[in-house]
Structures are given as structure tokens and as C-alpha cells.
Image (cartoon, rainbow, N blue to C red):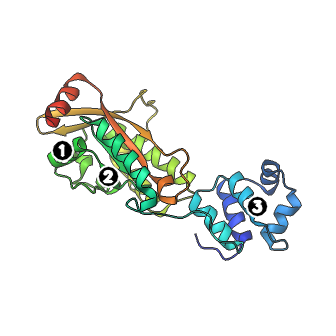
Amino acid sequence: MTATTFGTVLKEWRGIRRMSQLDLSNAAEVSARHISFLESGRSKPSRPMALHLAETLELPRGERNRMLSAAGFSPMWHRHDLDAEAMAPIHAALQWTLDRHDPYPAVVLDRHWKVVDLNQAARTMFAALGLPEEVDFLAQMTQAGGVRDLIDNWSAVGRFMHSRLRTESAALGGDDILDAAIAQLANDPELAPSDEAFPPIVTIDLRLGDALVSMFSTIAQFGTAEDLALSEFRIELFFPADEPTRALLEALAS
């Protein structure tokens, strides 16, 4: 997404959110005439107006920066490395969460499903599966020869993943990497459309040697994240879905 004017960015995101100028004017409590003038370039937005329209359109932080830049203002959000001094409390909180989830696996993922950090239980499981610690789960789940080949219930997991990726990409206004994974899953013959509803919890059933490990996950995100990286990170905590899995995970940890 490359644009040189505020009006172009505004119109682009209005289209992504499927809003007419009148829809946006009503939601933002701004006249439709002013929205039209902003898109055509006849009017220039103030910084507060640019931020207000970005908030109304529910733009991701990076796209709000892009909108500000297109309007001639400096960006508001920045991206820090996890090991930066300003991120020390956040890094400590992540580590606290990961450590206390042992003996069950827990990972920190970025927006493209790459592992940023993980706990000891996840390290042990990854080693048993022959995976490196810095796993690219999009690649592993969309290509033959990866983790997907070890998933006993791939049809259910793949269909759920396809749905989840579409939701994540839509929230971002489209993402080339996520969209490529969505296309690969859509062409997977094992994931034919089904009228069967998802169960209350979709487990991932992994073949680990002669054992079958069945887990479900919950996702945590930073609710007040203003940093670009933090707004994209999520912690995925895995739990045993049955007693044999619980026993196996606890045995692996010991």
C-alpha cells in the first residue's frame, strides 16, 4: 500500500472497510462534504482530524502512521526491539507468563506467525518434533513436509486456520504474507468447504512418535500496547485437551 496523498489513503481505507462517504461521515460525525473535500484534496486535515478518522476506520497503528505522514505530520507510533531498555518491563512480563505456563507449551508470535519467544515446554516439544526454536508457523502449516504432516486432524485445523487468517488480514486491511498463506490453504484439496460447524474448541492433534498429543490454545495480547511491535505480538498458551496429553507433557517437562 503506497500512497502520496491523505485523500488517497483515506479513500483506500474507506473502501477496505466498505464504507461510503456518508457512512464515514455519520460514524465520525463529520460532514460528508468535508470527507469529499479531504479525499479530493480540496481540504487539508488537521492532525487531530487525521487521527480521528483513523480511529473511526479502526486502522492498525502502522497505517495510522502512514495516514499521518500522507497528511504531512510526523508519525505517532514507533517500533522498539524487545531487548531495548524501554521494553524491559514488557520483556519481563512476557518471560514471567511463559515460565509460569510450564509444563505446557507457550509461544510469543508476531503478526506473521513467527515465533519470537517460547518457554521450556515449547522448546522440548519443538525438539521432539524436529523443529527449530524460531519457527515460521505459516510456512510449516501451508507447505508439505512441515508440521501440518504431523497433524492428525488437519482438515479441521486447516479450515479453522484459514478462517482465522482471513479475519487477521481483514483487520490489517490486507497483508501480502497472510494473503499468500490464505491462498495456499484455499487450494488445499484436504480443506474442501464443509457445512459442518466447528466444535466449541478446535484442538490440534499432533503425532509425536507413537503418541498423539491433543491440545487447545488461548491467546493473550497487550491491551494497551502503543508500540508497533507490541500491538502485533500475541502469546499463545497451549493446554492439554485430554488426560494422556497432560501426562505426556508433564513427563516431557521432567
- The answer to which image quadrant residue 8 occupies is bottom right
What is the count of numbered marks?
3
Amino acid carrying mark 3 in the image: Pro
Check if mark 1's residue and mark 2's residue have beta carbons within 8 Å.
no
Amino acid carrying mark 1 in the image: Thr
Q: Which residue is label 1 attached to?
A: 124
Q: Nearer the viewer, residue 159 or 72?
A: 72
**Which quadrant of the rendered structure holds the C terminus?**
top left
Label for residue 40? none
Residue at the image position 18 percent from the left and 26 percent from the top = 247
Query: What secondary structure is found at the residue carrying circle 2?
Result: strand
N-terminal-most mark, 2 or 3: 3
Picture coordinates of residue 69, whole percent (x, y): 65, 72
Q: Residue furthest bottom?
A: 4
N-terminal-most mark, 1 or 2: 2
- Using a 10 Å C-alpha cutoff, classify the residue at mark 2 as few (fewer than 14 neighbours), some (14 to 19) or many (20 or more): many
Q: Which residue is label 3 attached to?
A: 48
Real-space Cα distance between discs 1 and 3?
A: 49 Å
Q: Nearer the viewer, residue 116 or 155?
A: 116
Query: What secondary structure is found at the residue carrying circle 1?
Result: helix
Q: Which residue is label 2 attached to?
A: 117
Q: Is residue 155 visible?
A: yes
Picture coordinates of residue 96, whole percent (x, y): 35, 42
Amino acid carrying mark 2 in the image: Asp
Real-space Cα distance between discs 2 and 3?
A: 37 Å
- The answer to which image quadrant residue 240 occupies is top left
Left or right position of 25 against 230: right
Left or right position of 204 against 168: left
Picture coordinates of residue 187, whole percent (x, y): 39, 53
